[in-house]
């Protein structure tokens, strides 16, 4: 099975790219962190630690405190591919995160982004 290069990319490399995107569109780090926390269960300290430790995305998701059970409600297209149709579980989680960040940047209401819930 082919190993995707993104799996070994550090979360610390991806995070500032996400942040630049949401800030460029007039949104905040707090909004972005909120949706990442909702998806993965990482709290503020946990997110900071993953950045400090420069964990790769495989580790970031493998060690996520609690993937949100409502993540399967995330649908739509990222990079021309429907996230709900991605077969590789790790790639799907990465694309879920991409989709949530895109929704923050796009100004979607937080209740919609969090799929009607607010539990981190």
Image: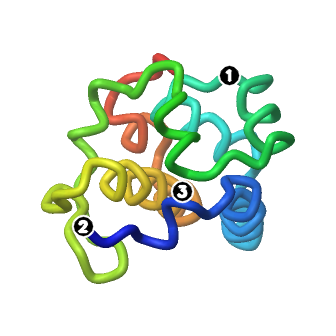
Question: Which residue shows up at 67% across the image and 39% down it?
Answer: 33
**Residue 113 at x, y = what percent?**
42, 43
Report the front residue among 37 and 63. 63
Looking at the image, the residue that sits furthest to the right is 52
Q: Nearer the viewer, mark 2 or mark 3?
A: 2
Mark 2 and mark 1: Cα distance apart in space: 33 Å
Checking the image for residue 1, the label placed there is 2
Could you tell which of marks 2 and 3 lies nearer the N-terminus?
2
In the image, is 102 to the left or to the right of 18?
A: left
Mark 2 and mark 3: Cα distance apart in space: 28 Å
**Residue 112 at x, y = what percent?**
37, 41
Report the front residue among 47 and 100. 47
Checking the image for residue 101, the label placed there is 3
- Residue 2 appears in which quarter of the rendering? bottom left
Report the front residue among 92 and 55. 55
Could you tell which of marks 3 and 1 lies nearer the N-terminus?
1
Mark 3 and mark 1: Cα distance apart in space: 17 Å
- Up-down relation of residue 25 to residue 46 (above or below): below
In the image, is 2 to the left or to the right of 63?
A: left
Question: Which residue shows up at 75% across the image and 73% down it?
Answer: 24
**Residue 94 at x, y = what percent?**
43, 55
Element carrying mark 1: loop
Q: Nearer the viewer, mark 3 or mark 1?
A: 1
Q: Write down the residue under mark 1.
A: 43
């Amino acid at each position: 099975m082919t190993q995707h290069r993104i799996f070994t990319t550090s979360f610390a490399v991806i995070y500032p790219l996400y942040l630049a995107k949401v800030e460029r569109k007039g949104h905040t780090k707090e909004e972005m962190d909120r949706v990442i926390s909702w998806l993965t269960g990482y709290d503020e300290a946990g997110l900071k630690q993953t950045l400090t430790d420069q964990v790769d995305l495989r580790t970031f998701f493998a060690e996520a405190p609690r993937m949100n059970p409502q993540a399967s409600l995330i649908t739509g297209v990222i990079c021309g591919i429907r996230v709900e149709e991605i077969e590789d579980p790790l790639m799907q989680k990465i694309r879920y995160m991409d989709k949530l960040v895109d929704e923050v940047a796009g100004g979607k209401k937080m209740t919609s982004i969090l799929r009607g819930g607010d539990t981190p």
